[in-house]
Image (cartoon, rainbow, N blue to C red):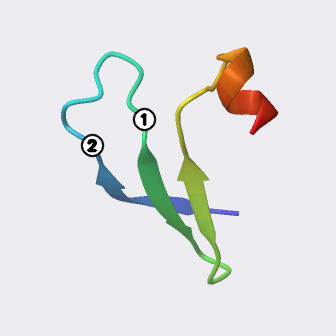
Amino acid sequence: MKITLVAVDPDSQPQGSPTLYKTDRGSWVVQGWVVTDPGVLAR
């Protein structure tokens, strides 16, 4: 599978999230933030 970068949040350095990619199969890959806050995860 080949992925192509579509968009990235320029203010999200150094991790580079969130980021959006399109695949050569017509699907999308979304890279988001890692959530570690127990309160947020419980919701």
Residue 31 sits in which quadrant?
top right
Determine which of the numbered discs, if any, sits on residue 40 in the image: none
Q: CA distance from mark 2 to mark 1?
A: 7 Å
Amino acid type for the residue under numbered disc 1: Ser
In the rendered view, tell whether residue 13 sits above or below residue 31: above
Q: What residue do we see at 42% from left, 35% from top?
A: 17
Quarter holding the N terminus is bottom right
Q: What residue do we see at 33% from left, 16% from top?
A: 14
Residue 5 sits in which quadrant?
bottom left
Along the viewing direction, whichever of 33 and 29 lies nearer the viewer: 33
Mark found first going from the N terminus, 2 or 1: 2
Percent x, y for residue 29? 60, 59
In the rendered view, tell whether residue 36 sits above or below residue 42: above
Residue 24 sits in which quadrant?
bottom right
Q: Secondary structure at mark 1?
A: loop
Percent x, y for residue 41? 74, 30
Asked if marks 2 and 1 touch (Cβ < 8 Å), the reply is yes
From the viewer's perspective, tell me whether residue 19 is left or right of residue 2. left
Determine which of the numbered discs, if any, sits on residue 9 in the image: 2
Q: Is the residue marked by circle 2 packed among few (<14), some (14-19), or many (20+) residues within 10 Å?
A: few
Along the viewing direction, whichever of 16 and 35 lies nearer the viewer: 35
Residue farthest to the bottom, as pictured? 26
Residue farthest to the right, as pictured? 42
In the rendered view, tell whether residue 37 sits above or below residue 33: above
Residue ID for mark 1? 17
